[in-house]
Image (spheres, coloured by chain):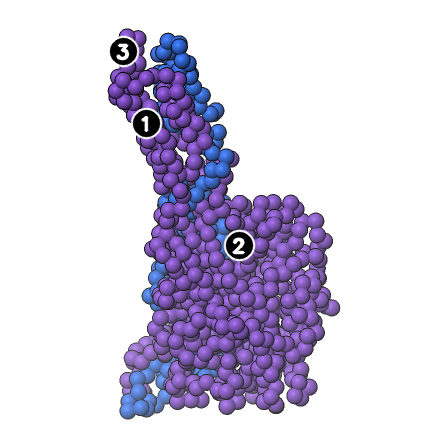
């Protein structure tokens, strides 16, 4: 589009050009009409050479916008909270506070997804002394954007405990040493903070969502990956669980127990920062 | 403003009424007085309109690079990063109290930025590397390498970092408020959870009140645990018009040991004389995403005076002072002619000058054993990531030389600042085999469970015309992690059946950390470079024999407009 030009310059001594005057005011022709051309027709040619788009020209959230949602409420997720599941179960459990659904009102050139979480896993190093075999139960957190897993952002958890694997034997040796052993539970060493960023380009108008999901299958001791092991059971000292009676527990014996994994989340949130 | 139409069409024989003539022209002039909006301007301007670099956002950035005090400034033999408990003066000391505290440098300048905003959202990204001093443990002589759980015999760390968490929490504090949603931890300072072991029955034949109802309580887990980590914290914080102070703050939570642990009666672990945590490389980036900014544009005025009764109509009165004046103003629309919020996304060029990313999934992951240079601030680069004779220098994180975590050919031909965010899934840092300086002895225990094995990471860039080993590092992006998972310590155990001490091969392989290395940098390309750049994530180890693995990673580059 061009600059506005006059249809008539109203020269002195000449009859008034009615058509020219009307065209100077309003016309359907491009490049004329001081009322008609600004009806959506002002182009770069109409802007002063020194014109710059300033911040106050930009409608709110039409160039950039940000969303953040999350929670600070701590949550403990135990693998047995998921019920009986097979290891191949593709279903992952969404983590409260680590999911966000946003509306993008127009296609943006770039959007930065960020998700952060404070996490403390309870993930044991399982060791069978007789056979010198070891195993570590799988625990994973996966991230899905619009339902599609982002494989570069799958994360695992640090080992945070050490447990000897012994068959449950109420009269025999105790496998799980319990908190009294002092060398079993190291969860206090592994609290970590994850802050992860992902760039998405050409994010289309509409709803988009990021959800982080946990994968916590039941623990099986399967160092050779045979896939046919049962859920792990251990013998544990009953004093691990017994209430104290005047500061003491009278008696001692082993009790068959199932071992689980746990993930504790603290502060966590998801953010989306859009650049149009 | 919305579309305007003339109130009349002039026809032959019409009387030229001054009011009607005025209403022909003056609405067009009035529209130029700050009333033009999205209805008036064609969206074709988006491809060529000039933009104030701070039209969409503005930013503030703080950074401080600080290197470690290694035992030796020799590649492959750095040993400890806190030799003699010393630091360089640009490291910031964390006070051992429970209060949120500003991070102060050697010149008493806080890690803080003040930004004046309208109604906006602040996108904050902060980075800090912390190190709990005490790795220089050889002062304790024999037995130093044993992972003992009590402070009187602290084992590998003067302050017991093998069993005691460092207890740090970081937070983004805005205008004095470190709200819980921006804290790296759990707000409940004494939070404990249960150890997930569950008895299969609730009755015992021989023991009263057993096995329940007591729970197997875990340890205090409200704050960061490892003694050495890079941390990045982010937030989106809505703010009202005015000045805002944004800072990264830190506090240290005392460790309250569980009474259930065998070697103690529990209670708060007291800080010792060497118990110091220093903050090294650190950055604070605050980007104001503008929503309703304060007025910044001078008014624009277009004049088309009213016609008066019996005013002589001439070229001067009709055209020169009115129609031509308005036409001229429409052909040179000034900034003040647009109303607030006149332009929507269709009118605007991209808010960024460029954006790119690279994401990698390596699966089981490549292993690295290359040594960082004599000083981690040096930019020596090696292409040998893993070899029997380790390469000397930083190496680009890649999978056996392919699929690097690198952005290629990123344009910086327009003056800009490039915000770089990178993540690495790092695991299994282990095995330096460094001898005890006090005794010269080295044992398998040490290799298996030494927490003094360090992997370092750094963001670097190069011009695309540079050689494979010519890179420029960003010192303030240096991050370091240690082998904090040491306890699968089963190289020797008493055999279950025979009572004999046996060596258990392979157990050290399970010393698995899964730690997030989260880095950031702000690259300054003002003046710009006609040659594009590559940006990559590099890594290395401090001592010979140390290795680490990378499972996944990604890097993001955002080219921000710069004033």
Does the residue at mark 2 contact the one at mark 1 (Cβ under 8 Å)?
no
Chain with blue colouring: A
- Which residue: 72% across, 53% down? B467
Between B48 and B212, the one nearer to me in the picture: B48
Q: CA distance from mark 1 to mark 3?
A: 22 Å
B359, above or below B82, in the image: above
Left/right placement of residue B487 relative to residue B294 reads right
| Among the two numbered marks 1 and 3 on one chain, the one whose residue lies closer to the N terminus | 3
The percent position of residue A14, horizontal first and vertical second, equals: 40, 9
Q: Nearer the viewer, mark 1 or mark 3?
A: 1
- Read off the chain for label 2: B
The structure residue drawn at horizontal position 25% and vertical position 20%, both measured from the top left corner, is: B309
Q: Is residue B125 left or right of residue B67?
A: left
Name the residue beneath numbered marker 1. B305
Q: Quadrant of residue A72?
A: bottom left
The answer to whether residue A49 is left or right of residue A213 is right
Residue under pointer 3: B14
Q: Secondary structure at mark 3?
A: loop
| Chain letter tied to purple | B
On whether disc 2 and disc 1 are found on a single subunit, the reply is: yes
Can see residue B292? yes
Q: Are marks 2 and 3 on the same chain?
A: yes
């Amino acid at each position: 589009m061009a600059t506005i030009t006059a249809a008539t310059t109203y020269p002195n001594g000449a009859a008034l050009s009615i058509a020219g005057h009307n065209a100077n005011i309003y016309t359907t022709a491009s490049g004329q009409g001081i009322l008609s051309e600004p009806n959506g027709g002002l182009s770069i040619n109409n802007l002063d050479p020194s014109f710059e788009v300033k911040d106050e020209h930009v409608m709110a959230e039409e160039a950039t916008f940000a969303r953040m949602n999350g929670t600070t409420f701590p949550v403990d997720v135990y693998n047995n909270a998921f019920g009986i599941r097979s290891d191949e179960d593709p279903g992952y459990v969404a983590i409260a506070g680590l999911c966000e659904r946003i509306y993008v009102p127009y296609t943006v050139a770039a959007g930065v997804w960020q998700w952060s979480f404070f996490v403390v896993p309870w993930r044991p190093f399982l060791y069978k002394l007789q056979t010198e075999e070891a195993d570590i139960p799988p625990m994973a957190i996966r991230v899905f954007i619009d339902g599609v897993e982002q494989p570069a952002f799958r994360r695992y958890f640090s080992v945070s405990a050490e447990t000897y694997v012994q068959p449950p034997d109420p009269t025999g040796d105790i496998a799980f040493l319990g908190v009294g052993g002092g060398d079993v539970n190291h969860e206090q060493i592994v609290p970590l903070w994850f802050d992860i960023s992902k760039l998405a380009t050409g994010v289309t108008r509409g709803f988009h969502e990021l959800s982080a999901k946990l994968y916590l299958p039941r623990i099986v001791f399967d160092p050779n990956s045979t896939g046919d092991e049962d859920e792990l059971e251990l013998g544990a000292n009953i004093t691990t669980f017994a209430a104290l009676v005047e500061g003491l527990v009278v008696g001692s014996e082993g009790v068959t127990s199932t071992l689980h994994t746990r993930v504790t989340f603290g502060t966590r949130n998801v953010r989306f920062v859009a650049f149009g | 403003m919305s579309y305007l139409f003339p109130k009349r069409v002039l026809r032959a024989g019409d009387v030229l009424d001054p009011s009607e003539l005025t209403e022909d022209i003056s609405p067009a002039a009035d529209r130029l007085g700050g009333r033009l909006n999205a209805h008036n301007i064609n969206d074709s301007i988006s491809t060529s309109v000039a933009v104030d670099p701070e039209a969409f956002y503005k930013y503030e950035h703080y950074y401080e690079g600080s290197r470690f005090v290694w035992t030796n400034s020799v590649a492959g033999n750095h040993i400890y990063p806190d030799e003699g408990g010393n630091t360089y003066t640009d490291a910031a000391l964390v006070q051992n109290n429970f209060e949120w505290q500003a991070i102060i440098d050697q010149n008493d300048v806080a890690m803080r930025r003040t930004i004046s905003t309208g109604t906006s959202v602040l996108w904050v990204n902060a980075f800090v590397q912390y190190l709990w001093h005490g790795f220089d443990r050889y002062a304790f002589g024999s037995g130093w390498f044993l992972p003992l759980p009590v402070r009187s015999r602290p084992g590998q760390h003067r302050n017991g970092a093998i069993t005691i968490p460092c207890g740090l929490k970081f937070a983004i504090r805005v205008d004095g408020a470190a709200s819980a949603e921006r804290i790296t931890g759990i707000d409940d300072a004494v939070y404990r959870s249960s150890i997930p072991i569950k008895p299969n029955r609730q009755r015992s034949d021989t023991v009263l009140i057993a096995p329940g109802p007591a729970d197997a309580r875990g340890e205090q887990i409200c704050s960061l645990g490892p003694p050495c980590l890079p941390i990045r914290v982010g937030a989106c914080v809505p703010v009202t018009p005015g000045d805002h102070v944004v800072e990264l703050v830190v506090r240290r939570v005392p460790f309250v040991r569980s009474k259930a642990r065998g070697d103690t009666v529990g209670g708060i672990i007291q800080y010792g004389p060497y118990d110091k945590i220093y903050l090294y490389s650190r950055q604070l980036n605050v980007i104001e995403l503008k929503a309703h900014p304060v007025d910044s544009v001078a008014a624009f005025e277009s004049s088309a005076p009213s016609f008066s009764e019996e005013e002589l109509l001439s070229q001067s009165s009709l055209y020169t002072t009115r129609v031509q004046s308005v036409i001229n103003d429409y052909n040179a629309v000034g900034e003040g002619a647009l109303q607030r919020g006149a332009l929507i996304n269709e009118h605007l060029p991209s808010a960024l000058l460029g954006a790119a990313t690279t994401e990698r999934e390596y699966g089981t992951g490549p292993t690295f054993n290359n040594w960082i240079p004599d000083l981690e601030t040096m930019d020596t680069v090696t292409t040998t990531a893993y070899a029997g004779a380790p390469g000397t220098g930083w190496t680009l994180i890649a999978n056996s030389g392919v699929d690097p975590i690198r952005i290629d050919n990123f344009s910086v031909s327009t003056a800009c600042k490039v915000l770089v965010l990178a993540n690495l899934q790092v695991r299994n840092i282990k095995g330096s085999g460094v001898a005890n300086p006090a005794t010269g002895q080295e044992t398998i225990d040490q290799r298996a469970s030494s927490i003094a094995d360090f992997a370092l990471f750094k963001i670097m860039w190069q011009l695309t015309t540079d050689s494979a080993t010519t890179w420029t590092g960003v010192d303030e992006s240096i991050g370091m992690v240690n082998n904090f998972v040491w306890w699968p310590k089963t190289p020797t155990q008493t055999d279950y059946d025979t009572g004999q001490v046996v060596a258990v091969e392979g157990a050290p392989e399970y010393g698995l950390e899964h730690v997030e290395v989260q880095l950031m940098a702000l690259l300054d390309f003002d003046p710009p470079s006609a040659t594009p750049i590559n940006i990559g994530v590099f890594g290395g180890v401090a001592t010979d024999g140390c290795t680490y693995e990378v499972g996944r990673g990604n890097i993001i580059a955002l080219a921000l407009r710069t004033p």
